[in-house]
């Protein structure tokens, strides 16, 4: 019996998202595994307790907002809203990292974690919906696996070289670099705006 190849030519949308995911997670892991050290060593008044509180703020902001963003994505027709949420979430996260390079105290940390959770909630559901929409049906499991593999390989590379570059250039320079690369990951998705399957937008009103 002749076997078909697991993956044929990748759809354009999948190619764009795989490239965007790879750059996004590489950029994030240049820094994120080492951020707690930055929090404690370079921000005034930050202890392990404050790091824990800031993580609580992040997860609450993300957890409370993500179902709202999912609801909005579900009830606007077409894919332009998902592409917009994805690009905005990535872009805003990149700007946030650049701004955090100028942080000095615990309140800056709390604001950083809050908005990091907000921007993750904005981009997260849209990202998953887009990837699922662009999947060819018979290759779904394979391409989800490819996405996970590229994300983890990119994250591994980022973490592997991130510590080295932080030692050379410091946390604040790496915050700026992470922000710039995250913004670049957002811009990679711009061609998807032109290829969104519907230009119509329709708000669902439950009353």
Image (cartoon, rainbow, N blue to C red):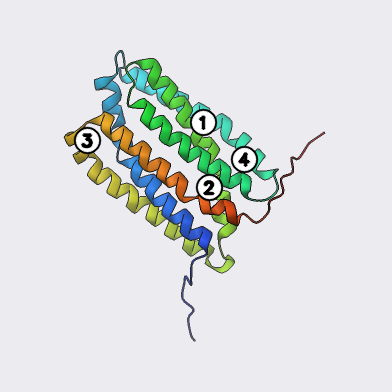
Q: Which quadrant holds the C terminus?
A: top right
- Residue under label 3, please give it: 166
Q: Residue 137's spot in the image, x, y percent?
A: 59, 65
**Residues under labels 3 and 2: Cα distance?**
29 Å
Q: Give the CA distance from mark 1 to mark 3.
A: 26 Å
Q: Residue 8 location in percent, x, y?
A: 48, 72
The answer to whether marks 4 and 2 mark residues whose Cβ atoms lie closer than 8 Å is no
Residue at (59, 46) in percent of width and height: 82
Q: From where the camera sits, is residue 53 visible? A: no
Label 1: which residue?
Answer: 118
165 lies left or right of 122: left
Q: Earlier in the sequence, mark 1 or mark 3?
A: 1
Q: Nearer the viewer, residue 174 or 123?
A: 174
Q: Vertical placement of 5 versus 93: above or below? A: below
How far apart in space, not on screen, are marks 4 and 2 (Cα)?
11 Å
- The answer to whether residue 157 is above or below residue 118 is below
Coordinates of residue 126 in the picture (x, y in percent): 57, 45
The image shows residue 24 at horizontal and vertical percentages of: 40, 45
Compare residues 32 and 84 and report the one nearer the observer.
Answer: 84
Tell me whether circle 3 and circle 4 mark residues in contact (CB < 8 Å): no
Q: Which residue is mark 2?
A: 127
What residue would you read off at disc 4?
70
**CB under 8 Å between callouts 1 and 3?**
no
Report the Cα–Cα distance between label 3 and label 4.
36 Å
């Amino acid at each position: 019996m002749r076997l078909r190849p697991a993956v044929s030519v990748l759809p354009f949308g999948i190619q764009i998202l795989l490239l965007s995911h790879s750059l996004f997670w590489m950029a994030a892991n240049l820094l994120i595994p080492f951020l707690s050290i930055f929090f404690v060593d370079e921000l005034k008044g930050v202890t392990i307790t404050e790091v824990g509180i800031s993580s609580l703020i992040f997860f609450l902001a993300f957890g409370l907002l993500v179902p709202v963003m999912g609801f909005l994505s579900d009830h606007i027709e077409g894919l332009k809203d998902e592409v917009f949420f994805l690009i905005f979430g990535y872009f805003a996260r990149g700007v946030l990292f650049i701004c955090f390079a100028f942080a000095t105290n615990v309140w800056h940390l709390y604001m950083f974690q809050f908005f990091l959770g907000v921007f993750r909630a904005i981009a997260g559901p849209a990202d998953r919906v887009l990837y699922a929409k662009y999947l060819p049906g018979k290759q779904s499991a394979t391409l989800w696996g490819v996405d996970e593999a590229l994300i983890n390989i990119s994250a591994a590379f980022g973490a592997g070289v991130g510590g080295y570059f932080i030692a050379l250039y410091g946390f604040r320079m790496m915050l700026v670099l992470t922000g710039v690369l995250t913004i670049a990951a957002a811009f990679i998705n711009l061609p998807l705006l032109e290829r969104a399957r519907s230009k119509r937008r329709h708000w669902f009103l439950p009353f």
